[in-house]
Amino acid sequence: MSHVLAHDQDGVRTLTLNRPEALNALTLEGTRELGEQLEAAAAAAGVRAVVLTGAGSAFSAGGDVTLLRAIPAMSDAELRTVVYGTFQRPIRAIRTTDKPVIAAVNGPAVGAGCELAVAADFRLASE
């Protein structure tokens, strides 16, 4: 199952965080996938803008807490790789692209989910 769905229409690539059963909490795999998708959108000639949203009732509940359980067992080098190499990759992709990134915040945006929304150029929120 893909953690991020991509859909192109009229020059707009919509990226949907796709773990609604977990309020779109970000796993390592999902975060890597999101970074790759954002970088691909930035490089795609036919994409003029990117919309980032969440499936279901939440934008993103942030980092998946099961990941937090693994942190005490990680070395400092592993933790740096996870935080800077993986979790910051989507943020860097958003901040470095020339294309506008719109966060369509359709529910709670907590922790890393809030960070994604704030990194976007524009934020639209539902009630």
Image (spheres, helix red, strand yellow):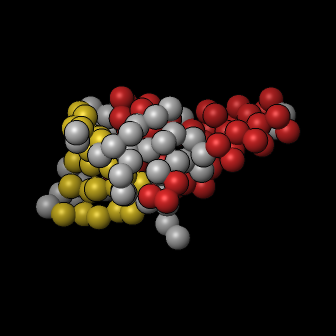
- Residue at 33 percent across and 38 percent down: it is 97
Residue 22: x, y in percent?
Answer: 52, 54
Residue 124: x, y in percent?
Answer: 21, 38
Q: Left of 109 or right of it: where is 100?
A: left
Q: Left of 28 or right of it: where is 40?
A: left
Above or below, 54 relative to 127: below
Which image quarter is the C terminus in?
top left
Q: In which quadrant of the rendered view does residue 104 lie?
A: top left
Exactly how many numbered labels are in the figure?
0
Q: Left of 117 or right of it: where is 27?
A: right
- Residue at 40 percent across and 37 percent down: it is 109
Q: In which quadrant of the rendered view does residue 14 lie?
A: bottom left
- Observer-nearest of 79 and 36: 79
Is any part of residue 92 visible from this angle? no
Quick one: which residue is furthest to the left in this view? 10
Is any part of residue 106 visible from this angle? yes
- Residue at 50 percent across and 32 percent down: it is 111
Residue 80: x, y in percent?
Answer: 71, 31
Q: In which quadrant of the rendered view does residue 91 lie?
A: top left
Residue 52: x, y in percent?
Answer: 32, 48
- Residue at 27 percent across and 56 percent down: it is 13
